[in-house]
Image: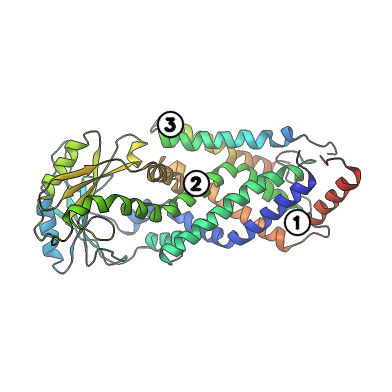
Amino acid sequence: MMTAKKARTWYRVHKWTSLICTAFLLMACITGLPLIFSDELDALMQPHIPPAPSSANAPTANLDRMVIEAQTKFPTLHPYSLAWDDDEPRIFVNMSPSDDPKFGDIRTVVFDAHTGNLLEIPKGGTTLTYFLLQLHREIFLGLPGELLMGLMALLFVIALVSGVLVYGPFMRRLNFGTYRRNATLRTRWFDLHNLLGVVTLAWAFVVGASGIMNALSTPLFGIWRAQTLPPILAPYHGKPVPKHFSPIEDAVKKTSLALPKMELNSVLFPNDVYGSPRHYVIWSKGKTPVTSRLFTPALIDVETGQMIVAQSLPWYLRAIEVSRPLHFGDYGGLPLKVIWALFDLALIVVLGSGVLLWLKKRSTSLQSELDRMVHMESISGVTVQ
Amino acid sequence: MSRTLSIREIYRWPTAIALVIVTGLLSALFGDGVWDAFSWLLLVIPLLLLLIFLYRK
């Protein structure tokens, strides 16, 4: 077993990493709780018009016509993206005033995928779940906030690891699962912190680690785009930006032929910020539980309709994509979401009890107990077990 | 209790629970249908354990 001196070091690491990240973590846990159920909340707060009943194999209606119709509804905006609904045969045409829209800028026109009929135009503006997500992910600070939350997630993971390491020395004389319900308030908090912390540990670690990865996704995706696009755009250097776009129908068909084992997910119109200024970026995804998380981009020249490239993302972006559901808990039906919420509540108790333990110092603090153990060790020369 | 537990004894249960959780988390990720149900079954175990430890006499 580790020496008391090492235990004391890990205790300090646990204390300080926890203290720094706790306020952010509490905020993330509290906003995360309703976010687990964001699909259900969105459906509840904004009921939508369902598409006409049809067989799953019915052909998709003409996409270009949908875009033209969306344009007539919002003549001052330009087509930004087009997306296939995961659950129902619906297609969303998103209109935006700029290539880098702020939330609330985008207006969506919803079409029936098979009949091509306009279903509805949801009212613009922000939703409750989007507000919570912005707070949860970046505390309304954009990329700096996202990176700050990533750093807090890193501190949280370090707190978990150091927490496991100090769990041993503190549990030497206690059976697993000890909860002394009749002891002093502080002892009960101590037991609660240890019990809930160690039982939910693996879940907390997975959510913390996937949180770090999510926070890195924006910069990593930007790096990938900065490496991939310049060679593709080089031949067009000095040429004017195209005014006339080739049909989306053709671009989508070419993509489907090039990626026969995948299904279409979305089309990003020419975009200086998130895509290419002179290509459609068409995203496809796999059909199995795992590959449906993995998106593959295809670039189609908007002038000539020629396919430029269709290749998988690099491993680090694929890893982020696969790990994303492990953060949200939205990949195993409603029961998994409920389980996620219960683990989240347990984590809130761990965080709260941790702060209370720090605030309400014992007459002999854990620190001084460890100091005493270090002293004993140094005079006896024996490792305290 | 007065006996000092060995490192193996201290970490035996936490390790077992962590394995149950990780298996549960991955089962729903890599499969659908019956694998989702298997995941719920596994992930409920640590939550039930918590209730037992907190409410036992």
Secondary structure under tag 2 reads helix
Which residue is at a point 56% across and 47% down the rendered structure image?
A204
Looking at this view, name the residue that lies furthest to the bottom: A76
Looking at the image, residue A178 sits to the left or right of residue A270; the answer is: right
Look at 12% across and 59% down and name the residue there. Answer: A242
Circle 3 crowding by C-alpha within 10 Å: few under 14, some 14–19, many from 20: some
Asked if one can make out residue A221 in the rendered structure from this viewpoint, the answer is: yes
Chain of residue at mark 1:
A
Callout 2 amino acid: Trp
Q: Which residue is mark 1?
A: A186
Residue A189: give x, y in percent of width and height. 71, 54
Q: CA distance from mark 3 to mark 1?
A: 41 Å
Badges 3 and 2: C-beta atoms under 8 Å apart? no
User: Please, which residue is most extreme toward the top here?
Assistant: B34
In the rendered image, which residue does mark 2 sit on? A340
Please say if A377 is above or below A362: above
* Amino acid tagged 1: Arg
- Secondary structure under tag 3 reads helix
Q: Position of residue A299 (x, y in %)?
A: 21, 47
